[in-house]
Amino acid sequence: MDVIYTDVLVVGGGLAGLRVAIGAKRRGLEAITLSLVPAKRSHSAAAQGGMQASLGNTCKGRGDSESVHFADTVRGSDWGADQRVVRMFAETAPKAIRELAAWGVPWNRVERGDHETVVNGKRVTITESDAAHGLITARNFGGTAHWRASYVSDGTGHSMLCTMSDRAVAESIPVHERMEAMALICDGDRCCGVVARNLKTGALLA
């Protein structure tokens, strides 16, 4: 059985897996990603609604903050979420949105002036300020206190995944496609690898 060694092995080539591999590489570690399918065909591409972040750029997002986002998320989980993780997520999300914009995700942008939209089943007119024109916009999604779902038309996941995959290529991170993790290799309580199957050849490797 062939054995491949690396500092960090990421199982899964979707948005989360690619972002972890990029983060590890930027910390000076060698990272390899295993993916059942080509990375740009991962299921993350199916996400359409948007990514929640308390940017507060739109008129319906004014007054939003990481603390309000935190409270919304904990309430939405019926107080079942790990609040330390929720706090970290709420505080990191705005930075992640801007980072993705810098990498090339074409987030929809605020357009100044009056716009018709539907709020609580009723057609209303909202007015965006001149100062907000061109900033990353957001829409209502998920019953939150403020509008905070940043989006790319109806293809948010697809746009994010293509951008993340391109960034992984730019960072020279190998993505081993058509690879299935069959079993974890553990040393006591520590996981130190996997046994994987190459779905093209049927060969096993570690």
Image: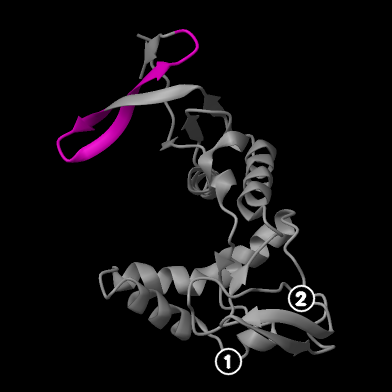
Q: Residue at x 49, y 41 (%)?
A: 29
Percent position (x, y) of residue 138? 65, 73
Decide if residue 73 is on the left or right side of residue 144: left
Q: Residue at x 82, y 75 (%)?
A: 134
Q: Secondary structure at mark 2?
A: loop
Q: In this orientation, which residue lies closer to the viewer: 106 or 191? A: 106
Q: Secondary structure at mark 1?
A: loop
Q: In this orientation, which residue lies closer to the viewer: 111 or 26? A: 111
Q: Can residue 199 be found in the magenta stretch?
A: yes
Residue designated by label 2: 135
Percent position (x, y) of residue 206? 35, 19
Using the image, determine if residue 55 lies above or below residue 11.
below
Q: How packed is label 2: few (under 14 Cα within 10 Å), some, or many (20 or more)?
A: some
Using the image, determine if residue 27 lies above or below residue 72.
above
Q: How packed is label 1: few (under 14 Cα within 10 Å), some, or many (20 or more)?
A: few
The kind of residue on which mark 1 rests is: Gly
Q: Residue at x 35, y 67 (%)?
A: 85
The kind of residue on which mark 2 rests is: Leu
Using the image, determine if residue 8 lies above or below residue 120.
above
Percent position (x, y) of residue 59? 69, 88
Decide if residue 106 is on the left or right side of residue 171: right
- Give the quarter of the figure containing the N terminus: top left
Residue designated by label 1: 63
Q: Quarter of the image holding residue 192?
A: top left
**Mark 2 to mark 1 CA distance (whole Å):** 16 Å
